[in-house]
Image: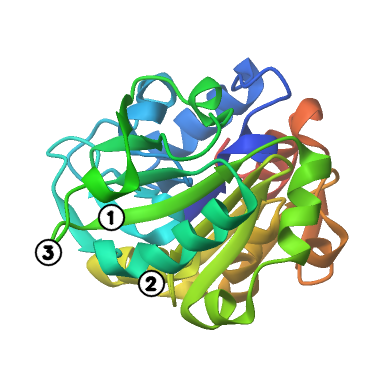
Amino acid sequence: MINTIALDMDNTLLDSKKKISPRNTKVLRALHDHGIHVVLCTGRPINAIWPYIKQLGLTQPDDYTITFNGGLVVNNVSRKSIFHNGFSYDDLKEVFQFAHEHNYPLDVLDFDQVYEIMDMPRSIYKGTLKNIKFVDSKFNEMPAGDHPYAKVVMAIEPDRLSQIIKHIPDTIKEHKHVVQSQPHILEYLPQGVDKSVGLQHLLAHFNSDFSNLMTFGDADNDLGMTKVAADGVVMANGLPEVKEVADHLTASNDDDGVAVYLEKFFATIL
């Protein structure tokens, strides 16, 4: 029985204007009121999506969010984490060297803020996030030692990003989980970090498992959770490789695809 619904945000729950539609809001609030766990799964920090959490009413003591693409599972009310996995400063060096060599923009996120790396050109990442602190920093001035980092981001125009992806060294691919989360954003995550990993820890916290999970997604960073879910649903606007592993398809993010599917699946309680 499905008791947890995990939703990607950009190009899935959010429309092209970065809004949650009234129809999607109504359905998800109703299911949440029926005791079903509604979990937002995003690459962003929780502060950056807080308006969406409030819009959906996900502010009860047992409400959680999967952030940093599975790197942090955090309680929406207490902000305490039940799981986190990050980089050390030394882990970041090979990505920095790659970016510096090719003059690619770079942003580094810890679990509180974003470091805009000033050794390279400015990125467009700041324009994609709200409610999160950005700090100018040279790479060698960032906190080292045991300070934990969540991920590294390259944010650049899609045509240039496709060229970057072709030139990522194998050594980076072997030690990092590299995923394109949006057409203009490439993320470097700790090896093994994935939305499915965060969800596995959250479901265990709920005394549940993947057999009770429904997911909605569209992009490469949704592949893992789509594969493991009892019902992995992919949007009409999803990438072909994600659609291939889907259990079901639904309408696009601009056509209330989340609500369209949920209204049918949960017709007896909605």
Q: Name the residue at 68% across, 60% down.
A: 220
Of the 4 image quadrants, the one containing the C terminus is top right
The amino acid type of the residue labelled 1 equals Tyr
The amino acid type of the residue labelled 2 equals Gln
The residue where tag 1 is placed is 149
Q: Please tell me whether residue 179 is drawn above or below residue 9 in the rendered image.
A: below
- The reply to whether discs 3 and 2 touch (Cβ–Cβ < 8 Å) is no
Crowd band around label 2 with a 10 angstrom C-alpha radius: few (<14), some (14–19), many (20+): some
- Mark whose residue sits in front, 3 or 2: 3
Disc 1 versus disc 2: distance between alpha carbons? 21 Å
Q: In this view, does 264 lie to the left or right of 39?
A: right
- Circle nearer the N terminus (3, 2): 3
Q: Please tell me whether residue 265 is drawn above or below residue 78 in the rendered image.
A: below
Mark 3 secondary-structure assignment? loop
- Circle nearer the N terminus (1, 2): 1
The amino acid type of the residue labelled 3 equals Asp
Q: Is residue 140 left or right of residue 57?
A: left
Q: Which of the numbered marks, if any, corresponds to residue 146?
A: 3
Q: Name the residue at 74% across, 35% down.
A: 157
Asked whether residue 85 is in view, the answer is no
Residue 233 lies, in percent from the top left, at: 71, 57
Q: Name the residue at 59% across, 22% down.
A: 20
Q: Which one is in front, 210 or 173?
A: 173
Mark 2 secondary-structure assignment? helix
Q: Is residue 55 left or right of residue 84?
A: right
Mark 1 secondary-structure assignment? strand
- Mark whose residue sits in front, 1 or 2: 1
Q: Please tell me whether residue 93 is drawn above or below residue 113 in the rendered image.
A: below
Asked whether residue 239 is in view, the answer is yes
Crowd band around label 1 with a 10 angstrom C-alpha radius: few (<14), some (14–19), many (20+): many
Q: Which of the numbered marks, if any, corresponds to residue 200?
A: 2
Disc 1 versus disc 3: distance between alpha carbons? 9 Å
